Amino acid sequence: MALAGCRTTEIGDPIEIALPHNLSSQSAQTLVTRFIEASSGARMSREDPLRHVFASARGRHSMARRLRGKWRIEAWNPESMVAAYAWKRHILRVEIEFQDRSLRLGLGEGTNVDQSATQIHSTAKALALELAQEIRFVFGKVASGSAPVAADAAAISFCDAMWGSNSSQRESCGRAQKRSYDRLRPLIDLVKVKPSAPDSQRMKACYARAQTRAGTDWESTERCFYSYPASDL
């Protein structure tokens, strides 16, 4: 099923977005993941400091809202993810690669979006450009300090969602998550340098298992890596 009309446009080069000075690559991935999940209707607590930032980024009159489709995360690992937007029988796929000080968005292989090696339907391209602009908006809020996201954004977002207004539990959770992440950092770096190494494969499997609607559970990732036999991953 093709999109209405024959309006195709050049796929073009990947879009590169610089990371704010106060955001690490891993924290950027957590932030983008949470934004895409929120865009798909995932619940956010009223106390979540990112709730209004995400709502402002998407806006009431975005193309994604008008088409009444949904964004979702189709695949992820510690250095990249695939975000997919599905509406009717069409699927746009955007490949997002997280680098040290930037991220790159490129068009992956979509479904029913009149895509060739160099062309894609203009609606699909516009949706990808809109996502890039929304991510820039969120990063701008982080850079200005309007969004309370620092280098340990993964721990903050996960623990906020898990414990809400229970400040003592939230703070304890945040410290534990940050400790686990710091201990796993050499393995995260290994995945980027030697993705096919046995420890890299194990780390990627554990990272995937530890994804929740609240974000990445780094304690679970660490337990998985050091506790589960390889046959269970």
Image: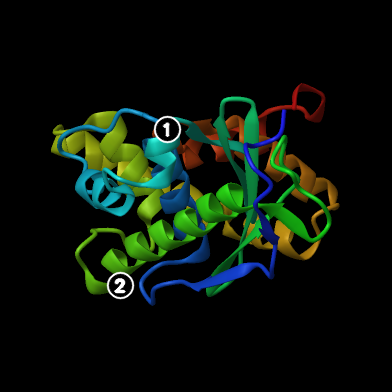
Q: Residue at x 42, y 62 (%)?
A: 133
Image x and y of residue 3, in percent = 65, 37
Which structural element holds mark 2? helix
Q: Residue at x 39, y 37 (%)?
A: 66
Q: Quadrant of residue 47?
A: top left
The answer to whether residue 51 is left or right of residue 23 is left
Q: Depth check: 7 or 122 in front?
A: 7
- Which numbered dot is residue 181? none
Image x and y of residue 54, in percent = 29, 48
Q: Earlier in the sequence, mark 1 or mark 2?
A: 1
Q: Residues within 10 Å of mark 1 (few under 14, many from 20)?
A: some
Query: Is residue 90 placed above or below 151 in the rendered structure?
Result: above
Which residue is label 1 attached to?
40
Q: Nearer the viewer, mark 1 or mark 2?
A: 1
Q: Residue at x 31, y 53 (%)?
A: 57
The answer to whether residue 24 is left or right of residue 169 is right
Label 1, label 2: how far apart the Cα atoms are: 25 Å
Colour convention: rainbow
Residue 75 can be seen in this image: no
Image x and y of residue 12, in percent = 69, 68
Circle 2: residue type: Ala
Q: Residue at x 28, y 48 (%)?
A: 59
Q: Residues within 10 Å of mark 2 (few under 14, many from 20)?
A: some
Image x and y of residue 209, in percent = 61, 30
Q: Depth check: 151 or 118 in front?
A: 118
- Which numbered dot is residue 143? 2
Circle 1: residue type: Ser
**Furthest-top residue in view?**
232
